[in-house]
Amino acid sequence: MARATADGAGRRFPRRREIAGLAALFVLSLVLRLYKLDASFWNDEVLMQKGASLPLMEIISHRFNFLYYLLAHICLNWADNEVMLRLPSVVAGVLGVLALYGLTRQIVGARNGIAVPLLASVLLSISAYHLERSQEARFYALVILASILMTWTLWRALESRKWTAWAAFCLSANLGVASQLTVLPYVGVLLAAAGFRVAIGPGAGTARRRLIGLATVALVGALSVVPLCVSGIAQGKSPDALISGAEESADDASIAQPPGGPDASYRLTPLMYARYLASYLPGTSAGVRIFLTALMLLGSASLCKRTPTVAFLLIVQVLVVPLPFLFLHMEHWFNARYFCSLMPFVPLLTAMGVQAAADLFRRLLSHLHEQGPLIGLLPRVLLGLLAGAASLISCKDAADHFRDFPEHDWKSMGKQVASLLEPGDTLAFARSPIVHRGRTTAVREKGYDSRSNVLEFYIRRYLRDTDSGDREKLFDTLRFTAAGSPDQIRAITNQSGSHRVLFISRSEESLSKPVRRLLSGLPSSRTVYVKGLTLRLVEVRNAP
C-alpha cells in the first residue's frame, strides 16, 4: 500500500509541474499580447472596423472570410475601440500557443517530459512575427491556430481512423477556411496527402479498407468547404479570388491595388518563397539564421524518426502549396502573411532540434566514456544553453517589435489634427512616389495616401467625441490633396487668397531632398511630432 501511494505521488508531481508550466505559459502569452493593444490602427484594421460594424447577415453576404468579422462584431458590441477589435486575434494567438504545446507533447511522447513542448510553445509565445499577427485586427492569428489544429487532428485521424478525429479535422479546416481563403490550398494538400496515406501508405490494409479511407477523405474534404458554400449561397456567387482584402467599394478597391497599379500582377518565385519562410525565423544576422536553420534541420530529422506521418504532412505543405503560385499570376501582391500557416512549425522544429542536439552529444559522450557523471550532466547543460540562446534571440526580436509598435501613431496625429482644424483647411500628405519594378506610381490626388482612411478615421472619432456638435461638421469642409513632389507643394502654397494647410509627412528620411528642403523652409506656425509622423501647420497668405 505504501508503494502504491508513493507511485501515485510520483505520478501526481509531474502532472502538477505540467499544469504549473501551462499556467505560466498561458499568462506569458496573454500578457505579451495585451501589451500596447490600444495602439493606433493601421490601414487594414480600419477596413476591418468598418466591415465588422455592419449587420451580421450583411457580413456573411458580402465576404467569404467572414469569421473574424463576426467575432469582431460581437466584441464591438461591448466597446468600440482598438482593444475590442483586436481581441479575437489575442484569443487566437494564446490558443495557438497552447495548441502547439499539445501537438508537440504528443509528438515527443509523455515519457520524455515537458521540456520540448514547453520550449516550442515559449518560442511561439515570444515570436515577434506571431506577436504581430496576434496584436492586429486581422485574421492571420486564426489562420495560424487553424494550421496547428489541422495538422494535429489529421495526424490523429490517420493514426486512429476514428470518426471523432476526422470530425475534429473538419472543424479545424472550417475554422481556417472561414478565416481566410488562402487556407484552401493547405486543406487541399493535406487531404491529398491523407488520401495518399490511406491508399498506399503503411498500414493501408485491404482494398475495402482503402476504399473506406478514401471515401472518408472525400467526405471530409466536402465538409471542409462548408463556410465557403454558405457564404457563396448568401452572396449568390462563387469566390473569384484566393487573396481576400479587396472590398466592394471603389475606395477600398483602390486601397487594395498593388503599388504597380490595378493592372499589375505578381507571380511567386522560389527566392521570394524562401525569403518568406526565412522571415518566420527570429533574428536578422546571417549567423543567427544559420544557427536556427541547423537546429531546424536536426529537428526535422528527429521528427521524421519519431512521427513520420507528421513529418510527411509538413513536407507536403512546404513543398506543394507554393507550386501553383509559381505559375499563376495574382492580382494581389504576395507577402509572408499569405504563407503564415507554416509559421508555427518553426518553433516546433527548433525545439526538437535542441533536444536532438543534446541527444547527439549524449551519444558522443557515451562512446568516449562508458560511465561517468558527465554523460548525464553535459547534455543537459548543452540543452539548456541551446534553449537559452534560441529564447534570447526571440526575446530580442519581441523587444524590437514592442519598441516599433505601432510604426506610425495615427491615433495621436488624428487627435492633433482634430484639435487644430478650422473651416476650409487643406490637409496635404507629403510622401515620395512609389517605385515598383522600375515604374513610378504617382501619388493619388484623391485619397492622399494608402493610409488616408486611418487618419480620416481618427479625425472623425475625435471630432465626434468633442462636446460641441459643430466640430464634427468641420470634417466635411476639409480638403485633401497630395504633396509628394516639389511642384505639388508649390501649387498648394502659391494658391491665391488666405488659407491654412496642414502638411502631414511620414518617414521624412524617405522623402526626396527637394521635398524635404521645401517642407523645412515653409513658414510653419506650428509643428507637431508624433511617432513616425510630422505635422506642419502653414498659413498661406497670398493676394486674391
Image (cartoon, rainbow, N blue to C red):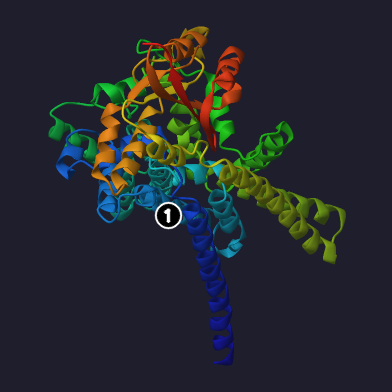
Report whether 10 appears left or right of 332. right
Q: Amino acid at mark 1?
A: Leu
Foreground residue among 198 and 276: 276
Regarding mark 1 in the picture, which secondary structure is present there?
helix
- Residue 250 coordinates in the image, percent (x, y): 25, 21
The residue beneath circle 1 is: 95
Q: Where does the C terminus fall, quadrant-wise?
A: top left
Quadrant hosting residue 447: top left
Q: Is residue 208 visible?
A: no
Identify the residue shown where x is 66% and y is 52%. Answer: 355
- Residue 211 coordinates in the image, percent (x, y): 28, 39
Q: Where does the N terminus fall, quadrant-wise?
A: bottom right
- Residue 137 coordinates in the image, percent (x, y): 38, 43
Identify the residue shown where x is 31% and y is 38%. Answer: 460
Foreground residue among 498 and 43: 498
Residue 54 position (above or below residue 126) = above
